């Protein structure tokens, strides 16, 4: 039993380190509904940049705020999906079912 726990722990540690590196190197882009704003995130959900087109600026402050929010939600959702997918592979590697409320279960 202890050997199995130690082996599972080592697998989790190794795969988590690998996953963290991959997520840090991944760039995910989120867009506003009309694609006038693009927010880039790292794969682990950290915002990296925000590009706003002149068309969005021309719509005024409130419109820009709305579009930035849309793009951030889109990018964050995509980053979260990538993280969940990678976590699912770790669960599979150690033979443990993922928590029931996760989309990768």
Image: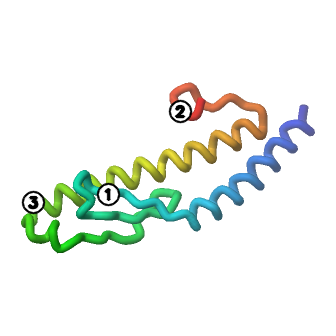
Q: In the rendered view of the protein, which quadrant contains the C terminus? A: top right
- Left or right of 47, for residue 61: left
Q: CA distance from mark 2 to mark 1?
A: 24 Å
Q: CA distance from mark 2 to mark 3?
A: 35 Å
Chain-order first, disc 1 or disc 3: 1
Compared with 57, 91 (above or below) is above
Q: Residues within 10 Å of mark 2 (few under 14, many from 20)?
A: few
Residue visible at 41% across and 47% down in the picture:
77
Nearest to the observer: residue 18 or residue 71:
71
Q: In the rendered view of the protein, which quadrant contains the N terminus? A: top right
- Left or right of 57, for residue 41: right
Residue visible at 9% across and 70% down in the picture:
58
Foreground mark, 2 or 1? 1
Q: Name the spot of residue 44 as percent of width and height, x first.
A: 52, 57
Query: Residue at the bottom extreme?
Result: 54
Q: Name the spot of residue 13 as percent of width and height, x first.
A: 75, 53
Query: Residue at the top extreme?
Result: 100
Foreground mark, 1 or 3? 1
Q: Name the spot of residue 39 as percent of width and height, x first.
A: 34, 64
Residue visible at 58% across and 60% down in the picture:
23
Chain-order first, disc 2 or disc 3: 3
Quadrant in the picture for residue 90: top right
- The residue labelled by disc 2 is 102
- The residue labelled by disc 3 is 62
Q: Name the spot of residue 72 as percent of width and height, x first.
A: 32, 56
- The circle on residue 31 is 1
Tag 1, which secondary structure? strand
Compared with 9, 14 (above or below) is below
Q: Residues within 10 Å of mark 3 (few under 14, many from 20)?
A: few
Q: CA distance from mark 1 to mark 3?
A: 17 Å
Compared with 67, 88 (above or below) is above
- Left or right of 60, for residue 26: right
């Amino acid at each position: 039993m202890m050997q199995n726990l130690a082996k599972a722990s080592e697998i989790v540690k190794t795969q988590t380190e690998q996953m963290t590196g991959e997520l840090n190197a991944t760039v995910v882009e989120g867009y506003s509904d009309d694609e006038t704003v693009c927010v880039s995130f790292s794969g682990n959900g950290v915002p990296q940049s925000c590009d706003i087109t002149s068309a969005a600026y021309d719509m005024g402050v409130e419109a820009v705020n709305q579009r930035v929010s849309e793009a951030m939600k889109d990018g964050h959702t995509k980053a979260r999906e990538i993280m969940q997918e990678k976590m699912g592979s770790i669960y599979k590697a150690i033979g443990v079912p993922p928590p029931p409320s996760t989309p990768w279960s």
